[in-house]
Amino acid sequence: MLQAGQTAPTFELPGAGGGRIDTHGLAEYTDNGWAVVVVFYPFDFHPVCTSQMCTLRDSETLSLLENTVVLGISTDGVYSHRAFAAQHRIDFPLLSDSDGRVAEAYGVRADEIDDHRGVARSAVFVVAPDRTVQYAWRSEEPADEPELEAVEHAAQCHGDECELPDGKSYL
């Protein structure tokens, strides 16, 4: 799995956001000085994934940060993403990694989850504008969720070494 301090692989994927289907890429944001919270999740409409994505949607800190964007990524298709986003009022782009190559590049592709092969494990990476990973987390069990406070804090202090609430030091 990609670790804090490493360079995040770039990607460009089709996705649904704001009811539209467009292409989104990491460099589109980082090259313009934005931090990116990259969130991998296994399935649209799965109860645990729905909870995780709605928690991120409801984060006042992430929504108020200037020059920070959340990108959700799963192997589900863009039309599923569009329906999922509409049903749960998710306002950030959900990208389709249909062949799992981006999940593989980030080290979060699972051999199998719930009888589905090649899907992403739940994972969160906070990527600074210079593409340095500031924070990295991956689930071991399907019901695991990242600590939202740590994700928010890493997104706020991107570019500098900072101590997160759990006492760990991240870049």
Image (spheres, rainbow, N blue to C red):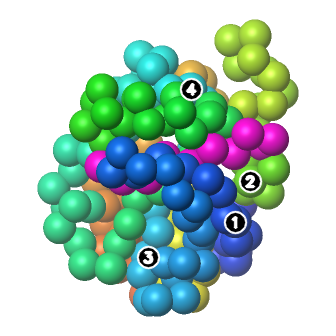
Between the C-alphas of marks 1 and 2, the distance is: 7 Å
* Residue 162 x/y as whole percent: 39, 78
Q: Secondary structure at mark 3?
A: strand
Q: How many other residues sit within 10 Å of disc 2, few (<14), some (14-19) or many (≥20)?
A: many
- Give the mark nearest the N terminus, 3 or 2: 3
Between the C-alphas of marks 3 and 4, the distance is: 24 Å
Q: Secondary structure at mark 2?
A: helix
Q: Which residues are magenta?
A: 91-100
Q: Quadrant of residue 156?
A: bottom left
- Give the mark nearest the N terminus, 4 or 1: 1
Q: Quadrant of residue 121?
A: top right
The tag on residue 11 is: 1
Between the C-alphas of marks 3 and 1, the distance is: 15 Å
Using the image as rendered, state which of residue 129 and residue 149 is in the foreground. Answer: 129
Check disc 3 and give the amino acid type.
Ala
- Give the mark nearest the N terminus, 3 or 4: 3
The tag on residue 43 is: 4
Q: Residue at x 50, y 50 (%)?
A: 21
The tag on residue 35 is: 3
Queried whether the magenta region covers residue 136, the answer comes back as: no
